[in-house]
Image (cartoon, rainbow, N blue to C red):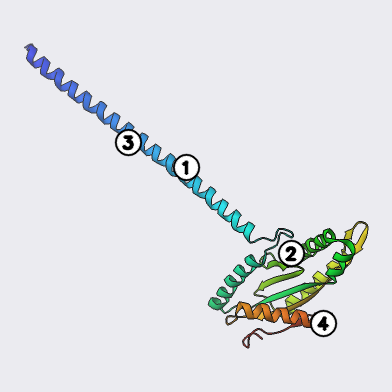
Amino acid sequence: MEKSQIELLIELAADFQQQTAINNRATEESEQSNALSTLVDLARDMQMRLDQQQNRIRQLELMVETDELTGLYNRRGFMRRTREALARAARNAERGLMVIADLDGFKEINDQYGHAAGDAVLRHFGQNLRTHTRSDDYVARFGGDEFAILMSGSSPDAAEKRINQLQNATARFPLIWQGKALGIKASFGYTVYSAKSDISDLIRAADDAMYAKKHAGRKTVTTKNADHDAA
């Protein structure tokens, strides 16, 4: 029995509605997929911008905490890392060493050869300090011709060994300035830090030990405890 025109129209309408529904679902899925893809791209872009911003912040922090002449930490950077080391010492009952070094006869080098030679001496000495200390030691130019080293988890015997290595290397490889070998000498002093140490007391004790050595004119390294617990 043949279908009437009305029945055919009803079937065509049903097919049309079904196809329209399929097309609508496909369009919605495509739009959702495009929206998701856009969100992913935005998230990646935001992460990239955040990483770039964090890198810029780290670079600025490094610039603020780095001595321009020697490339070592400056006083600000050194103090920050010393506070962090003391916080670790308090948590983990660790010990370490604060070392202060001051060049001997630096004024005479400046007076005789000029400030450019003095700057070269500071760079040369700073490089020796960095070369003959561990990668996890903090080395800084405190200002002028004074330098500082923080040796976490180190002992006085180990510190003296490293300082002697530094002094020997400095003697073997003097700075050559305009064809002349400039001998570089320094006085070192250190103090032991522990969980109870105060940063100001540490610096003062190591500085006092360094000046005691400088005034005594001895070759041995002088040590002075910053607190009673550090022995």
Q: Nearer the viewer, mark 4 or mark 2?
A: 4
Kindly identify the amino acid type of the residue bearing the numbered disc 2.
Answer: Arg
Q: In this view, does 27 lie above or below 45?
A: above
Give the residue displayed 22% in from the left and 24% down from the top. 20
Give the residue displayed 49% in from the left and 49% down from the top. 50
Pointer 2 residue: 130
Residue 77 position in % (x across, y down): 63, 65
Give the residue displayed 83% in from the left and 58% down from the top. 116
Total numbered labels: 4
Q: Earlier in the sequence, mark 4 or mark 1?
A: 1
Look at the numbered discs 4 and 2 and tell me whether their residues touch, using CB distance below 8 Å. no
Look at the numbered discs 1 and 3 and tell me whether their residues touch, using CB distance below 8 Å. no
Q: How far apart are marks 2 and 3 (CA)?
A: 57 Å
Q: Which of marks 1 and 3 is in front?
A: 1
Kindly identify the amino acid type of the residue bearing the numbered disc 3.
Answer: Gln
Taking the image as shown, residue 84 lies to the left or right of residue 102, namely left
Residue 215's disc is: 4
Q: In this view, does 200 lie above or below 171?
A: below
Q: Which of marks 2 and 3 is in front?
A: 2
Residue 23 position in % (x across, y down): 26, 26
Residue 186 or residue 31, whichever sits in front: 186
Q: What element carries label 3?
A: helix
Where, by quadrant of the figure, is residue 105 drawn?
A: bottom right
Q: Earlier in the sequence, mark 2 or mark 3?
A: 3
Q: How far apart are marks 1 and 2 (CA)?
A: 39 Å
Pointer 3 residue: 32
Q: Distance between the residues labelled 4 and 1?
A: 61 Å
Q: Earlier in the sequence, mark 4 or mark 3?
A: 3
